[in-house]
Image (tube, helix red, strand yellow):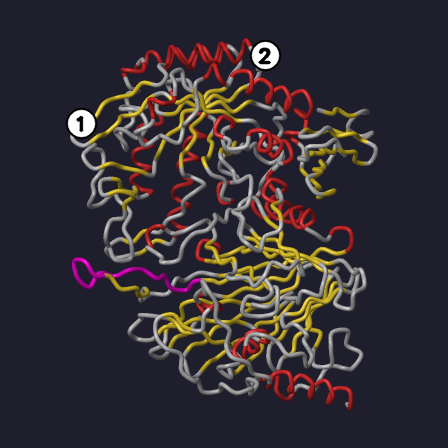
Amino acid sequence: MLAALVVAGIIAAARSLTQAQATGEGQLPSLFSGEFGFPEEPEPGDGEARPAGAGDEVAPAPPESPVGPDFELVASSTHLELYVNKSDSRLAVRDKRFGKVWRSSPEVGDRPLKGGALWRQHMDSAFVITYTDARKRGTKVTNNIREAATISWEPLESGLKARYDMPRLGIALSIEYRLGDDYLDVRIPGDEIGESGEFKLVTVEPLPFFGATLDDVDGYMLIPDGSGALMHFGRRRGEPRRAFYEPVYGQDWISKNIYSILTHVSMPVFGIAHSGADGREVRGSFLAVITKGDFEARITCSPAGYITDFNHASVEFHTRRQYSAPISATVFVNTFTDELLRGERALRYLFQAGDEAGYPGMAAVYRRYLVEERGLTQNADATPRLQIRIFHGITKKSGMLSGFISMTTFDEARAILDALLDAGIAAMDVTLVGWTRDGYDGAAPLRLPPDARLGGEKGLVALVAYAKSKGQRVFLEDNYLDAFRGNGGFSTRTDVIRGYDKLPRFIEPDNFFLTPEAALRLASHDMPVMARFGADGIDIRYLGEYALSHTERRRSERRDEVTRKRLDLADLARREFGGAGSIGGDMYVLGHVDRITDVWMEDSEYEFVDEDVPFYQMVVHGLVPYCGYPGNLRSDPDIEFLKMIEYGALPAFELTYRHSSDLRETRYNMLFSSFYKDWIDVAAKEWGAVCADMGDLQSKLMTGHRVVASGLRETAYEDGTRVVVNYNEVDQEVDGTPVRARSYAVVRSSRAGEGGTAR
């Protein structure tokens, strides 16, 4: 009892500390700024009072509890134990394999900390919320402790449910905590969110400091930035000016959200890995996966020094969307939707221990989750295919004048294929771009017939037949997102995406977004006709890059609902052609496409990120083939070629029969170097490297990755093969294998075959 009183006294003293609320450049909404829109004022219950609840009179756990005297064991599984402090809803998960304890509230003792009283409450809270008032012009931030929320508990199989009631706000919500063999599920039922007053819930951030740590612990944070990035704890970077705070699957263009986009989040995940707090080498990590509500979520990864002294990561779920509402012809104000975004929000913490801890282990459990929960299967086709895009034509618009630019006719495309075949390239996926009526997006959403200036339908059919006679696959790239006013085939009144302000959304004044219903109607009419051309599939532009919401007169469709309908396009392409590809690799396309083009191969270089890693590739490799940016458009050819090898991607090139200077003043001026004769030898070399040295790896799972030393990285595969890449300008040696400067080595194990290849 004395020990418990001493601990309680220390905790109470720590919570009484106050400091000025930290502010900084680029402060963000929700948890990252106390206010957005109207000034903060003292709240009732702003002191250090704990919430009252049904657990107030529960006796403390026995002193021998491995996580502390205030915690009660509520569930146990094969590898984990779940403990709860029912007086304030703090959680602890103990991994029985190595004794690692993960806490929802970091243990800080009596040390002075940056952040102020509100942030100290955030650290101990089960959730942080933002809410708005009747005017809906801005948000305020609070938490269950600050609101002195009453908590009632209900036992569940393998866990329990907490009901949090915040009377001052008239807001209530429930959170379920369930334990699996190696995971903790945290679920917020959408139908149990209650609002009984003027205040409306905008976001919920469950367990905002779960696994948080100071910089004195070895470890890192996995950030879903591009392909994946690591931020190591304790590496001095100066005072961080911002946190990673990004929407899953990118921005909802229609919401006109005011926050800038710094990267693209293709994966609804984040992770933390570190050793034990006592300094012993107890390795542990977790990967948090958003399993429900990922389309209406933002991921936060904050380095120590930004507002608080803690490295912490969490997910913020939106329950209302922000948008700009017109109050006159030229004046807009930011406000929020009246209706709640219903549906479940759920987060799964998958735990790793010992040698399995770290980002390779995180990738393995995420891949297993996708296989078991989403039905993905390993790719049986091990053929490494060069990804060749041939750009055909585009309509150049200049003022009142327009003209068609033919970069590659269908007959000329045969010459490109012959040159590639003569160079020894035996297997290709050939994607035809800009083959449609008026070329690239010229008559969108109309696409048929193929443009006569390129050779028409007869020329296209002949090209496809020729390529297939040489053993090559052919895909047609098509666009079912854009529509241009004046082209016909759609209505700007009924067939275009609208925002919450009910106004059509567009990229340019005459360039609209199609609703998924309109896109599917057009595709259902055109794809059966296009199937007669003989192609092997359709590459759907923007499918894995943009997730949009849509509002009609009487109803709104969330981003997940619109995206689910857009995925019907890929399913239709599979039925009509036998295959479908996605431009862009957001995780929701998996299971609907047979290959992915233009996946992220790097991070976006946040100031606090230490290194990029192929986390995305470790999850996807062996499930679906993928490639990055075309090799002829690289800014650093040698380094980006080696990155392709390290990340297990297929080589890709986008070529034309004529020089790319003709595209200079068109919508496709990004294709700045594409003349095929300049790139045949390079393409052949890269295909030869991938095919001769590691072609059999295309169907293998990527099981490991490590940074051996500066500029020296190693990727491992399930058959024991290791690919070592040397980015340095001097020769290196790894475990007895020489690796030449700016080159790589393939090291086979006894399972994969003897010997190694150095290049």
Name which residue lies at 65% across and 72% down: 106
- In the picture, the quarter occupied by the C terminus is top right
- In the picture, the quarter occupied by the N terminus is bottom right
* Foreground of the two, 290 or 263: 263
Residue of label 1: 401
Where residue 599 appears, x then y in whole percent?
Answer: 51, 38
- Relative to 544, 440 lies left or right: left
* Foreground of the two, 531 or 320: 320
Where residue 701 appears, x then y in whole percent?
Answer: 67, 37
Q: Tell me if residue 504 is in the magenta stretch.
A: no
Name which residue lies at 25% across and 61% down: 325
Residue of label 2: 424
Tag 2 secondary structure: loop
- Relative to 4, 661 lies left or right: left
Q: Which amino acid lies under the numbered mark 1 shown in the image of this protein?
A: Leu
Q: Which amino acid lies under the numbered mark 2 shown in the image of this protein?
A: Gly
2 or 1: mark nearer the eye: 1
- Relative to 81, 333 lies left or right: left
Q: Residues within 10 Å of mark 1 (few under 14, many from 20)?
A: few
